[in-house]
Image (cartoon, rainbow, N blue to C red):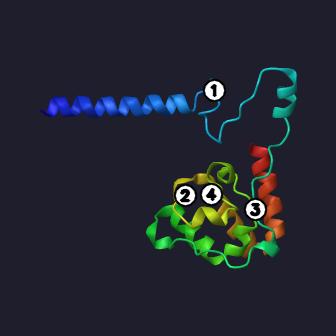
């Protein structure tokens, strides 16, 4: 009985691993998700790949208004907890920032703030790192939301 259960579990894990490989395979661009670019091997695509990717969605200051609350930081641990605490303190700033995990394309998020309204950010190092950077820039370096956005765009556009 235990052997049958063990083989069943191994089969499920193998199936899951196979699906992940299929999803992120360069030969399957439709299944590759928002984090993988479909780059053809002709000259025009090589030139395009050297250009910066588009800036993800964010709100301008006039759109911020009433934002939905972020999840309580106490629900999370480690850096995620720190990031959710930061999101609660500076929601208006995070709403004015793009999120470079490109969740605007994958999940319809409107800004970095949207990542903290649910548990998305707790599972995404990009969201967490961006929010902690934004918090430090605003609170310690006294940057405005516009200045924070420029720094975020420069940093994350260069990395992609």
Quick one: label 1 or label 2, which is nearer the N terminus? Answer: 1
In the rendered image, the quadrant that contains the C terminus is top right
Q: Position of residue 107 (x, y in %)?
A: 61, 53
Describe residue 157's horizontal placement relative to residue 44 as left or right.
left
Quick one: label 3 or label 4, which is nearer the N terminus? Answer: 3
Quick one: label 4 or label 2, which is nearer the N terminus? Answer: 2
Instruction: Choose top left, top right, bottom left or bottom right for residue 27.
Output: top right
In this view, 16 is above or below 96: above
Quickly name the residue at label 2.
120
User: For the residues marked 3 and 1, what is the alpha-carbon distance in whole angstroms?
Assistant: 29 Å
Look at the numbered disc 1 and give the secondary structure of its residue: loop
Quick one: label 2 or label 3, which is nearer the N terminus? Answer: 3
Q: Residues within 10 Å of mark 4 (few under 14, many from 20)?
A: many
Q: Position of residue 4 (x, y in %)?
A: 18, 29
Quickly name the residue at label 1.
26
Quick one: label 3 or label 1, which is nearer the N terminus? Answer: 1
Q: Residues within 10 Å of mark 2 (few under 14, many from 20)?
A: some
In this view, 151 is above or below 33: below
Q: Residue at x 30, y 30 (%)?
A: 10
User: For the residues marked 1 and 4, what is the alpha-carbon distance in whole angstroms?
Assistant: 25 Å
Describe residue 150's horizontal placement relative to residue 128 as left or right.
right
Q: Residue at x 79, y 71 (%)?
A: 145
- Front tag of 3 and 4: 3
Look at the numbered disc 4 and give the secondary structure of its residue: helix
Q: Residues within 10 Å of mark 3 (few under 14, many from 20)?
A: many
User: For the residues marked 1 and 2, what is the alpha-carbon distance in whole angstroms?
Assistant: 25 Å
Quickly name the residue at label 3.
58
Mark 3 vs 4: CB contact within 8 A: no
Q: Residue at x 65, y 42 (%)?
A: 34
- Front tag of 4 and 2: 2
Mark 1 vs 4: CB contact within 8 A: no
Mark 4 vs 2: CB contact within 8 A: yes
């Amino acid at each position: 009985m235990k052997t049958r259960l063990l083989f069943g579990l191994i089969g499920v894990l193998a199936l899951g691993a196979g699906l992940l490989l299929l999803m992120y395979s360069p030969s399957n661009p439709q299944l590759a998700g928002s984090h993988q670019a479909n780059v053809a091997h002709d000259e025009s695509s090589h030139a395009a790949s050297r250009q910066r990717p588009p800036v993800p969605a964010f709100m301008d200051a006039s759109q911020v208004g009433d934002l939905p609350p972020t999840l309580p930081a106490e629900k999370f641990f480690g850096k995620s907890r720190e990031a959710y605490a930061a999101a609660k303190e500076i929601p208006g700033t995070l709403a004015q920032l793009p999120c470079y995990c490109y969740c605007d394309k994958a999940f319809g998020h409107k800004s970095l703030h949207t990542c903290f309204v649910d548990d998305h950010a707790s599972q995404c190092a990009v969201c967490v790192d961006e929010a902690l950077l934004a918090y430090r820039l605003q609170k310690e370096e006294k940057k405005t939301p516009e200045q924070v956005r420029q720094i975020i765009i420069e940093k994350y556009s260069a990395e992609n």
